[in-house]
Amino acid sequence: MRTSYRRLTTVLGIAAASASALVLGTAPAQAAGNVYEAYNAITSPSAKTEFAEDGEILTALDMKKDGHGTAAQWRYNSSSATHSYYNGYGYAVAHDWNLSFAEGTTLQIRACLQDTSDGTPYSCGGWEYAKA
């Protein structure tokens, strides 16, 4: 009888420890900060831009097999100077850029199509606010 009790408590202890590790393991991901998104179209978008507050990572993602590349753009809040980053790696391949801003900086991001690295972005979506 004692052996069964020990096995049960061992199994329960392992289960509790596993659950604790799982909960503790997910805490940093929840505390990672906001991720802001912008698309080049409301319906059927083909380009996506993300800005991760934690680490200040700008990402461009090509969402359609249409032969076009994508551009992730950012600017300081309502500034006329636009910074553009081209992703020509193809469908479903994200490309990241590690940017650097002062903590709390407000910026805007948007997603566009672009055909070559020296091409001009076009079919851009609206500007979306983000914060560093």
Image (spheres, helix red, strand yellow):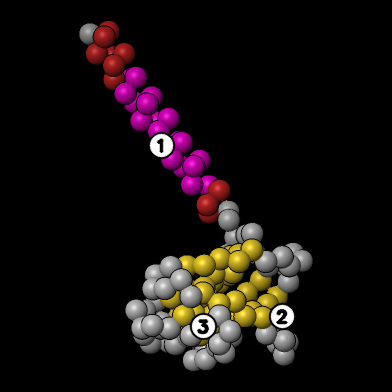
Describe residue 74's horizontal placement relative to residue 19 as left or right: right
Q: Residue at x 40, y 33 (%)?
A: 18
Name the spot of residue 13 as percent of width and height, x first.
Answer: 38, 24
Q: Secondary structure at mark 2?
A: strand
Q: Residue at x 52, y 91 (%)?
A: 122
Range of residues picked out in magenta: 9-27
Residue 19, numbered label: 1
- Label 2 vs 3, first from the N-terminus: 2
Residue 59, numbered label: none
Q: Quadrant of the N terminus?
A: top left
Q: Quadrant of the C terminus?
A: bottom right
Residue 53 location, quadrant: bottom right
Q: Nearer the viewer, residue 123 or 118?
A: 118
> What residue type is disc 1 on?
Ala
Q: Around disc 1, counting alpha carbons within 10 Å, would you say few (fewer than 14), some (14 to 19), or many (20 or more)?
A: few
> What residue type is disc 2 on?
Tyr
